[in-house]
Image: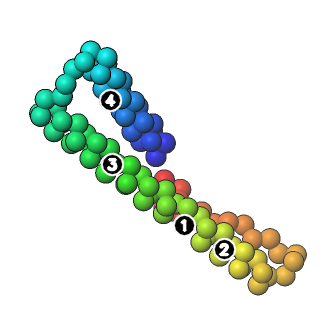
Amino acid sequence: MSHELFSISDRLREVAGLLRQAQDARYHLAPKDVVCLVDFTQQMANEAKRLENRLSCEIWNGRAAREENARLRAMLPDNVTVLPLRREAEVRS
């Protein structure tokens, strides 16, 4: 996931640089340029939303696992240690 995050920020910085160059050159955007810019920002918004959803899922799953672990610990005697079990899906990701 981190590679995807850096990809988005790099692409946005690149576009910002191009827009800054266009501004310095007093370039005005043609309608087709605006269409391309809108398409690009929509793609980046979609990608950012996808990553937000993945991150939210990771946070909620982690919280649920910690709560379940705490619940199990509370049910066991003090001399028993609970070791986390990694699920198959967690190992692959």
At x 42% / y 36%, what residue is drawn?
9
**Residue 40 visible, this orientation:** yes
Closer to the camera, 73 or 18?
18
Q: Amino acid at mark 4?
A: Val
Residue 44: x and y, percent?
32, 44
**Marked residue nearer the N-terminal end (3 or 4):** 4
- Mark 3 lies on residue: 45
Chain-order first, disc 1 or disc 3: 3
**Which is nearer the eye, 16 or 46?**
16
In the image, which is nearer the foreground, mark 2 or mark 3?
A: 3
Q: Residue at x 44, y 55 (%)?
A: 52
- Tell whether label 1 touches label 2 (CB within 8 Å): no
Extreme-front residue of the structure: 26
Residue 67 circle label: 2
Residue flagged by tag 2: what amino acid is it? Glu
Left or right of residue 71: residue 59: left
Looking at the image, is mark 2 or mark 1 earlier in the sequence?
A: 1
Asked if residue 21 lies left or right of residue 67, the reply is left
Q: Which residue is mark 1?
A: 60
Residue 28 quadrant: top left
**Which residue bears the numbered disc 4?**
15
- In space, the residues marked 1 and 3 are separated at their CA atoms by 22 Å
